Amino acid sequence: MNVYDATRITDNVYWVGAVDWSVRDFHGYLTSNGTTYNAYLVMADKVTLVDTVKRPYGKEMLSRISSVIDPGKIDYIISNHAEMDHSGYLLDTIEAVKPEKVFASSLGVKALREHFHGIKDVIEVKDGEAIDLGNRHITFYETKMLHWPDSMFSFLQEDGILFSQDAFGMHLASSERFDDELRDYLLEHEAAKYYANILLPFSNFVNKLFAKVEAAGLEPAIIAPDHGPIWRKRVEWILELYKAWAAREPKNKAVIVYDTMWGSTDLMARAICDGLKEQGTRVKVMKLRSDHRSDVATELLEAGALIVGSPTINGNIFPTVADVLAYIRGLKPVGMVGAAFGSYGWSGEATKQVEELLEGMNVELVTERLQSKYVPDGGVLSECRKLGQAVAARLSGLPMP
Ligand code: FEO
């Protein structure tokens, strides 16, 4: 007996995934709204399962499949992406279902072997290759680095459904399965956060993907990602957002990221904010013991400036600041200007270290680092304000976000 229901997407295709309401840490990404692991059942002559779910949710997936068909009747399984949130239950599913065939990209076959030592007989499909499901057909498109080297899309031709695995997804647990059942603001925020934290460093691959999709003449009616809602109303909207994000054009916005020990670096951050604001720049101020690194990455998606403040502790940069800069460096930001600031008691190494880290990620420094010995006085705060003004001057003329 099935406990959980499938959700019908079209006459022949069902969502059979799982909702993870409580996950808050997705390999370092703060998933404030949980996530979903989407799997899809195609009821063609050859019954086909597209992706599976994270392992703890495997039985839930099988139960949802059972609400449509006996899982033992699944003929084919497609693994679009080997990461464990989608293939964690793959081996168990193969053992339970005993499908006739399992398909993955060439790098997918390799990655699955490297995860499930002993997995056998996964069939390698090539870029552009199609498989025949009898009354339906699926074409595969390699989408390397979106989000892993093995990633691929599967396009169900007759239904116009693009199974896009991580791309166009978001970490959002909801009882609703479709984009038109959710609010625009929530969709845009979570899609942007996902892009900023997962796909941003691979933006060149997103650009190549659009060229490839256009060359293939693909016009999906529905985009079904492996996380978050299924796009059936705002297909063009999410495609346009991806094009804009992949272009990585900086806007007239500055993000001030800092931490503070006794409040001095905090005072400096506030004065810098006022200097920026006075010139019309949009500013986001983020104190790292309140704001998570993945929210900083989201705010930076359209920013033109990154201004970083750190007190000196034991001759070093403050640990939360080191953490966020290491994280942002991995996201390979481009086209930003910036500056470093912070307070110190007797040695003051942190701001120099911040500058070196900013330069290491190709952030162009607008001004010399600004330091305050112990508590900033009016003169130092005035310099902070000028620092904000100088950064704003560099952003002036850029479009507002
Ligand atoms: Fe949702 Fe790259 O896995």
Image (cartoon, rainbow, N blue to C red):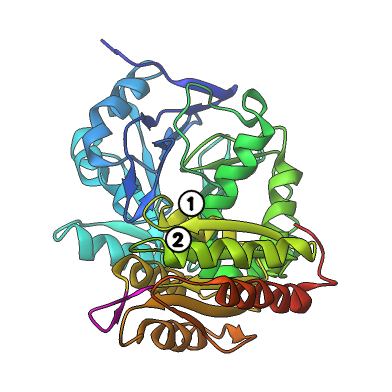
Q: Which mark is residue 44?
A: none
**Dot 2 crowding, Cα within 10 Å, few <14, some 14–19, many 20+:** many
Q: Is residue 162 visible?
A: no
On the image, the x and y values in percent for residue 375 come to 43, 70
Residue ranking furthest to the top: 1
Residue nearest the viewer, comparing 4 with 78: 4
> Does the closest atom of ligand 1 sit within 8 Å of the Cβ of label 1?
yes
**Dot 1 crowding, Cα within 10 Å, few <14, some 14–19, many 20+:** many
What segment is highlighted magenta in the picture? 311-317
Residue ranking furthest to the front: 378
Q: Secondary structure at mark 2?
A: loop
Residue ranking furthest to the right: 397
Q: Which amino acid, mark 1?
A: Asp
Image vertical order of residue 226 relative to residue 245, above or below: above
Is residue 316 one of those drawn in magenta? yes
229 lies left or right of 232: left
Do callouts 2 and 1 mark residues in contact (Cβ within 8 Å)? Answer: yes
Mark with earlier residue (2, 1): 2
Residue drawn 21% across and 46% down?
A: 91
> Does the closest atom of ligand 1 sit within 8 Å of the Cβ of label 2?
yes
Q: Secondary structure at mark 1?
A: loop
The quadrant the C terminus occupies is bottom right
Q: Which amino acid, mark 2?
A: Ser
Q: Which mark is residue 166?
A: 1
Is residue 17 one of those drawn in magenta? no
